Amino acid sequence: MSIKCFAYDPSNKNCSALHDSRNCGLACPFRKSRTEIDAARRNANRRLAGLPEAHQQHIAEIYYDGERPWMGKSGKAVGGI
């Protein structure tokens, strides 16, 4: 069976997100295609970029060593993290 999920690792037939093989497959509640995960990241980046400057800085310092990976060089939200 071919499992089209961003987290499925066919080499060990395991979910790299959950580190488990019991939920791999069509019934997995976390299953997303690469297209779906990319769209979710773009949406999250847009939300982060829309936050007040101080809030963005706070998030960047806590989670990203002061960097803002959601902002591209043009100052607009980017697609991936």
Image (spheres, rainbow, N blue to C red):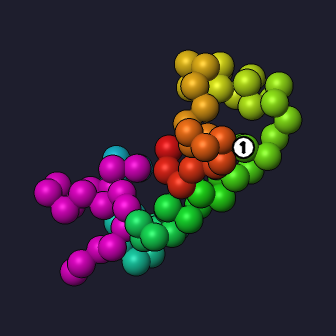
User: Which residue shows up at 50% across the image and 44% down it?
Assistant: 81
- Dividing the picture into quadrants, the one containing residue 42 is bottom right
Residue 13 part of the magenta-drawn span: yes
Q: Left or right: where does residue 78 sit relative to residue 59?
A: left
Q: Is residue 70 visible?
A: no
Residue 4 position, x and y percent, is: 33, 73
Residue 52 part of the magenta-drawn span: no
Q: Is residue 27 visible?
A: yes
Residue 63 position, x and y percent, is: 60, 26
Q: Please say if 51 is above or below 45.
A: above
User: Which residue shows up at 37% across the image and 61% down it?
Assistant: 6
- Dividing the picture into quadrants, the one containing residue 70 is top right
Q: Left or right: where does residue 24 sit relative to residue 60?
A: left
User: Which residue shows up at 50% across the image and 61% down it?
Assistant: 38
Q: Residues within 10 Å of mark 1 (few under 14, many from 20)?
A: many
Q: How many marks?
A: 1
SS assignment for the magenta stretch, majority:
loop
- Dividing the picture into quadrants, the one containing residue 40 is bottom right
Q: Residue furthest bottom?
A: 1
Determine which residue is flagged by label 1: 48
Q: Which range is magenta?
A: 1-17
Quarter of the image with the N terminus is: bottom left
Residue type at mark 1: give it.
Leu
Q: Which of 75/31 is in front?
A: 75
Residue 61 position, x and y percent, is: 65, 19
Q: Which of 76/49 is in front?
A: 76
Q: Left or right: where does residue 20 sit relative to residue 60?
A: left
Q: Left or right: where does residue 49 sit relative to residue 33?
A: right
Secondary structure under tag 1 reads helix
User: Which residue shows up at 36% across the image and 57% down it?
Assistant: 7
Q: Residue furthest front?
A: 74
